[in-house]
Image: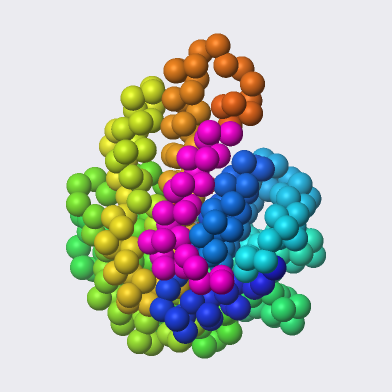
Amino acid sequence: MLLTNKEILSEAMAKGYAVGHFNISNLESLLAITEAAVEEKSPVIIAITSSSIKYAGLEYLTAIVKTAEKSTSIPMSLHLDHGPDVETVSKCIDIGFTSVMIDGSHLNFEENISLTKHVVELAQPKGISVEAELGRLAGIEETTVEEKDAILTDPSAAKEFVERTGVDILAVAIGTSHGAYKFKAKPRLDFERLKTIRKMVKIPLVLHGASGVPSRLVEKAVKYGAAISEAKGIPDEDIKKAISLGIQKINIDTDLRLAFTSTVREILVTLPKEFDPRKILGPAKEAMKEIVKGKMQLFGSAFKAD
Ligand code: G3H
Ligand code: 13P
Ligand code: ZN
């Protein structure tokens, strides 16, 4: 069942859990996520970035998501992640996405408002929900209070942003960042800021850059040849705390990539005679599926699609 993120997240907000946003770029990642959602009976957000569109093609990716959606009754949305411009947003709306993000977080406040408002006016009349981002996704381990205030989401600005744009969903910056290297030493997130934003903003909130970078995946990847030993992510306890303080959507990509490629590495090293792609990518898909299932349990969305 294809729904909008607004529909999926309003339910999550009312019941106090979060829904996973998982990025896809090929058939294996879509199968892993859909199978996990069905097994966990969990609502799910399937996300596609413009670089994945460049990689696999908008028509191909949309077609496989629509096929998955028809084969299950799980609440699912098809979402543009980090939409870079109005042109990409329009193409995604025209082809059947139910949700789009316009990422104006690199712009100044007024420019971000005007770009977001433009997309809201384009998407909402067609029943498509819109996510925007305010603040910069960056680590705050070594920053001063002033630097932190300049980087992270300002609660009063968030309130004004939501009121002036009419956006449905807001991504906030509280110290998470994209990729596998989120912290040098200890994880540090600004939960007080999140608490204040939640008090001032009534729409669903999103945590980007939320991968856990589990040490067992890093160790497996390193064992079979990867050079990523310094990688560190967001601990599960911090994710639970963020949900308890009012996050409803959690974006995961890096952990899926790590699960997939560490398994590909393992198979190539341990089964050197193997050259059937299905025998290499199949187990990688299974490893990705296990990660997605774990996230659904952690976020509290498992069994919410019953
Ligand atoms: O923020 C989302 C992704 O993790 C980055 O994805 O490499 O498809 O642009 P990308
Ligand atoms: P990670 O790199 O932590 O998985 O974040 C993904 C993300 O925010 C996609 O929008
Ligand atoms: Zn992101």
What residue do we see at 76% from left, 47% from top?
60
Residue 215, percent across and down? Answer: 29, 41
Question: Coloring scheme of the render?
Answer: rainbow
Look at 52% across and 35% down and name the residue there.
284
Viewer-side residue, 94 vs 239 = 239
- The percent coordinates of residue 281 (x first, y second) are 58, 32
- Classify 58 as above or below 21: above
Quarter placement of the C terminus: bottom right
Is 55 a magenta residue? no
* Helix, strand or loop for the magenta stretch, by majority: helix
On the question of residue 303 being in view, the answer is: yes
Is 291 colored magenta in this rendering?
A: yes
Q: Is residue 263 left or right of residue 176?
A: right
Q: What is the x, y in percent for residue 171?
A: 47, 69
Range covered by the magenta-colored residues: 282-306
The residue positioned 66% from the left and 72% from the top of the image is 3
